[in-house]
Every structure is written in structure tokens, then in C-alpha cells.
Amino acid sequence: MASGESRLRVKTEGNVTRVEFVDRNILDEGNIQQIGDEILRLIDEQDHPKLLISFANVEHLSSAALGTLITINTKIRAKDGQLRLTDIDPQIYEVFVITKLNKLFQIHETTDEAMASFK
Amino acid sequence: MTENQPSAQSVSHRLLNDPDRIRAVQDQLLAQAEEIGFGKSAAFALRLALEEAIRNAFLHGLKNAKDKPVDVSWTISPDRVTIVVNDHGPGFDPGDIPDPTAPENLERPCGRGLLLMRAYMSSVEYNDAGNTVTMRYEPGDD
């Protein structure tokens, strides 16, 4: 897996940055580190970041990926921004429920719902 | 690879902390699971638990030492998968791991691997030394 290529697809819609993952599996340390670094750079570029992360392509994720999401959430909150997660496969959503992170993150079923929820 | 029973396959690997190699080993288990008839939810559970156990072994057991190996073995049959991961490190007490679902720990970025292993496997047991975990998966638990 080439480490120089972006692991994200990024689009800007109004003042919202929409991120999708290139990889179906967000499991191993190297990938997760790269994904985290790329998203944290996007957050750094904005004063009050509004970030939507879509899991539409994702089939597996690990606790390391959850840790990175928590770090992203913490950084966005520190900048008075907003984070939304969307399009999460039911099997992966179960991971959020088991870890109770569905209570920490704002999770929406669809991108449209998530986009409409930004304040 | 040894086969003691016609329907059971036993595999063992000695791994260094190489993501490509770890992924290949996970893929081998998943391919065997599919071949033997396990479904999508079993594949999800096995991949996640194996990933978490190997990551814990390298990260916590061996403190990410590049030159120290982790031994991974499994036996798979239609009614059970038993996975053993041994990091040969100093070990730990699973009882010392704080509950990551407690409100005060919810925003900690680590500490969820063992929780997920326990959630997705039928049983998860550590040896007395705390450096070998044995996970069993029985597909009837789906």
C-alpha cells in the first residue's frame, strides 16, 4: 500500500468539509496514522471546522481507528467546531454501540441528514 | 500446518511488527473461515479480534519493539475457532484495564481493544503471566 497517496477523498460543500475513506479496512496502525494526520491537517486549516466523515466505503475498523476519531473530535471541539459521522454500516455501528462511542459522536444515517444537522 | 482431524486446520505463525505480514495472516484466517462456511458476521468478528489481539501484543506487550516476535496460532473447524496470541513479554493484568465505556474514560483515545475482543469472541482468557491470550469463537453465538 503506497504511503504517499492520500487515504481520503475530500470535498468542500459550503463551509463543510466532507471526508470519505479510500480504504475499506481501517485497521492497521500505519494507515490510521496517515488518515489521522490528513484529517488533523484539514482541521488546522479552519477556525471553526465543520467536518463530515462518511464511512460509506468502510467494512472494518479497529480500536486504533476509534482512538483517532476521538482525537479528531477533541481537536474539533477545542476549535469550537462540529463533527458529524455518517453512512456507517450496521456491523461497524455495533462497534460504536459496544464502546458507547455512539454517545460521544453525532452519528447520522445519511449524508443529507448529517449536512442538515450542522449549526 | 498440521491436520489432526479431517475437518480441523491448525496454523501457526511467528510475526514481527510488519503490517503487510499481519494483514496476510489475518487474510489467511478469513479465507479459511470462508472456506469452512463461516458467514459475514463471523468474518467481521474474527478479523477484529485478531487485529486487536495482535496490536495489543506488539503495542502493549512488546512496547513496539521491532525485533521481538509475536506468536499467533489458531485451530479452525466448522464449530469453533481457537486463536492464541503470545507476545513473550512481561505480561499484564487484564483487571488493571479501566472500563473504556465509563463516562470518565469515554474520551480516552485508547483502551478499547480488549473490550472488543470480549464482545466479539465467545471467550477471551489470559494466562497467569498475562502475555498469552486465548480467544474462542463459536459461530452459534452470532
Image (cartoon, coloured by chain):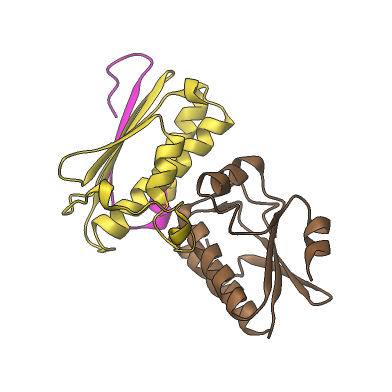
Q: Which residue is more in the foreground, A83 or B36?
A: A83
Asked which quadrant contains residue B84, the reply is top left
Q: Residue at x 83, y 57 (%)?
A: A112
Q: Is residue A34 left or right of residue B57?
A: right
Is B6 one of the magenta-colored residues?
A: yes
Query: Which chain does the yellow colour mark?
Result: B
Q: What colour has chain A? A: brown
Residue B96: horizontal and vertical position, in percent?
A: 26, 52
Q: Can residue B83 be seen in this snapshot?
A: yes
Q: Which residue is more in the foreground, A64 or A105?
A: A105
Q: Is residue B49 left or right of residue A101?
A: left
Q: Residue at x 49, y 52 (%)?
A: A62
Residue B25: horizontal and vertical position, in percent?
A: 39, 43
Residue B63: horizontal and vertical position, in percent?
A: 26, 63
Is A68 one of the magenta-colored residues?
A: no
Q: In the picture shown, does residue A5 fall above or below A46?
A: above
Q: Can residue B25 be seen in this snapshot?
A: no
Residue B45: horizontal and vertical position, in percent?
A: 49, 37
Asked which quadrant contains residue A41, the reply is bottom right
Q: In the picture shown, does residue B89 fall above or below A80?
A: above
Q: Which residue is more in the foreground, A57 or A108?
A: A108
Q: How many marks?
A: 0
Span colored in magenta: B1-22
Q: Residue at x 25, y 55 (%)?
A: B61
Q: Residue at x 52, y 69 (%)?
A: A71
Q: In the image as oriented, which residue stretches furthest toward the front? A: B103
Quadrant in which the N terminus of chain B is drawn? top left
Q: In the image as oriented, which residue stretches furthest toward the top? A: B6
